[in-house]
Image (tube, rainbow, N blue to C red):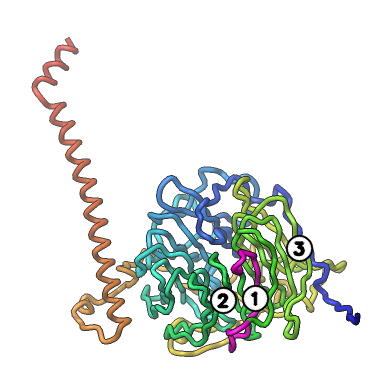
Amino acid sequence: MSWKLRSSKFRHVYGSPARRERCYEGLRISRSAHEGEFCAVNPKFLAVVTDAACGGCFTVIRLDETGKIDPMMPKVIGHQGAVLDVKWNPFNDNVIASCSEDTSVRIWYIPDDGLEDNLSEPLMSLYGHHRRVTNILWHPTAENILLSSAYDHKILVWNVNTGQAVTIITCHTDTIYSMAFNTDGSLLATTCKDRRLRVIDPRTGSVTREGQCHTGLKASKVLFLGTSKRLLTTGFNKLSKREFRIWEMDDLSRPLAHADLDTASGTMFPFYDSDTHMLFIAGKGDGNIRYYEIVTEKPYFYDLAEYKSSFPQRGLGFMPKRGLNTKRCEIFRFYKLHSARGLCEPVSMIVPRRSEQFQEDIYPDTPGCRPSLSAEEWLSGYNRPPVLMSLRGHYSPSYTPKLHLNVPTTKPTITNGHDGMDPADNLRSPKTENELRSMVFRQEGEIRNLREELKSRDVRIRQLELELQNYKKRESPDNRDREESMEI
């Protein structure tokens, strides 16, 4: 049998968990059955979705605040239902988006020093979905473009500058499992409970390509493999075995390659590093993280190694490349949630090198913290690749990228995802389907706000009635005589 030894600079990559004192302990990690990551990280903050007695909340921790977390630590508590997903703005490390079972998407601003008190007032509330919102996704190159998907089988494209849903994608017939942009954000890939893999134009909502995805009924995930015009999906086959598949974007009729993994039941989360062409796959409830090297020719991937742990992961977040420690030759860093232990554990993926000098071969220029497009430019049809930055000399635990979002000094007035709307707009006849939907969403938001105002007034009326009853009891003649006799 003929064979050829293949060399790779990533053959000996290993996982290095942080010491206990460098972890985050005492977190009440969410026990929701939702197939989410429940964690988001950037070079400043760690956000973890947590349980709450009522409503929904998540905790925001500064990265340097390791160790035991104060149980009375301030939280973000504005949602009325359980929080299902959180995502940091890629161009502003102080802005985070969240979505919830209360059908809303909310935008929050976190000060540099963290929260001093519970945060309940968002910068913006976006209403447009009719059922729980399960996933949110920021655009990779355009500033302040946000996507949200919900159990109403719709994806809304939001212009956060105006708070308006600019596109409504209605091509899905069942629950949407995952969304992923390509490198320049011109295409969107989705997986759905109807077992279809779709490639969509996010500006128009039209499906450009579609094919059969995994044959199993459980949740599947998708991502683009960098600029290679290929997709990767993770899911289950009809025998309930976990697998991943690699697809050519122009032909979704059959996969280029696939691999069967095991028979575990947890949903698998794929993570791809386009700089090193490494794929990481972690299963929910697993203790291990598998990693592979993706290549352009057959067999299209090579099995590298596996990080093993005896503690299962409840969720996973990952640090953007600009927050890694280049002196340790760190190429990826996970933040692993241990539900039973209430712990968030950083796990670094290290390329073993003896030198501490900057390694140019494993750190090419990478997408930075500057947008290449404004929201208006992207909506007008422009596409640009990400603005790249060099990691040479950029590592610092407190590295702060420049801010590009104009944070208002006061909370903007939002009505169903629209701020600053002209009242006369309600009197104009809609000319397109999107305008009609926007008008319906706006009116539903006004009704929702009026109902909330009525509830608060009803509560206030009941409080005043109780105070009046207590006052009448105190001032009644019988009560006065009783008090006077007691004094005598």
Dots 3, 2 in contact, CB < 8 A = no
Residue type at numbered disc 3: Glu
Element under disc 2? loop
Image mark for residue 245:
1
Tag 2: amino acid: Cys
Is 16 on the left-hand or right-hand side of 78?
A: right
| Region in magenta | 235-254
Answer few, some or many: residues within 10 Å of disc 2's Cα (few below 14, many 20 plus, some between 14 and 19).
Answer: many
* Residue occupied by mark 3: 306
Q: Secondary structure at mark 1?
A: strand
Q: Nearer the viewer, mark 1 or mark 3?
A: 1
Whether the magenta-drawn stretch holds residue 252 is answered as: yes
Outermost residue toward the left in this view: 477
Residue type pointed to by label 1? Arg
Q: Residue at x 61, y 69 (%)?
A: 237
Quadrant hosting residue 171: bottom left
